[in-house]
Amino acid sequence: VQLVESGGGLVQAGGSLRLSCAASGLTFNSFSMGWFRQAPGKEREFVARITRNGISIYYADSVKGRFTVSRDNAKNTVYLQMNSLKPEDTAVYYCAARYLSGGAYDYWGQGTQVTVSS
């Protein structure tokens, strides 16, 4: 199984980025997908989650109204559209796949760096 994130980079505050996570080696539409992030010196934190069929979506309060998670099961890809970025959004962003609802995430990507300058 591979999860490969892309789309990170350097952006000014107020700008936007779209992250992608391409999955392979698993039955993608059987997994809910999550986005997490880890800033330097901090613990990894939940950002967003989308269920298998894309109907239910959850966000951390810190990104609600600015970030949008979506998925394309035909392309085995999950996205994170990030708007109105703030310096505090600077982190390595990871996608993860979970088979059992409420369980631990089974697979993780390698992460992509997002840096927001003030």
Image (cartoon, helix red, strand yellow):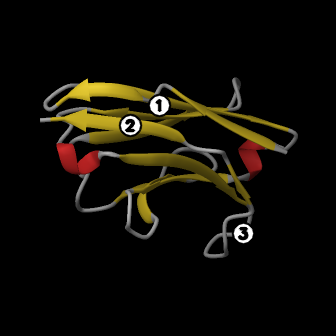
Dot 2 falls on a residue whose secondary structure is strand
Check disc 2 and give the amino acid type. Val
Quadrant position of residue 83: top left
**Residue at the image point whose x is 17% and y is 42% from the top:** 86
Q: Is residue 71 left or right of residue 41?
A: right
Q: Position of residue 111 (x, y in %)?
A: 57, 44
Dot 1 falls on a residue whose secondary structure is strand
Mark 3 neighbour density, 10 Å: few (under 14) some (14–19) many (20 or more): few
**Residue at the image point whose x is 55% and y is 35% from the top:** 71
Mark 3 / mark 1, whichever is N-terminal: 1
Q: Is residue 116 left or right of residue 74?
A: left
Marks 2 and 1: CB-CB under 8 Å? yes
Q: Is residue 109 above or below residue 79?
A: below
Which residue bears the numbered disc 1?
19
Check disc 3 and give the amino acid type. Leu
Q: Is residue 11 above or below residue 67?
A: above
Q: Position of residue 93 (x, y in %)?
A: 47, 46
Disc number placed over residue 100 in the picture, else none = 3
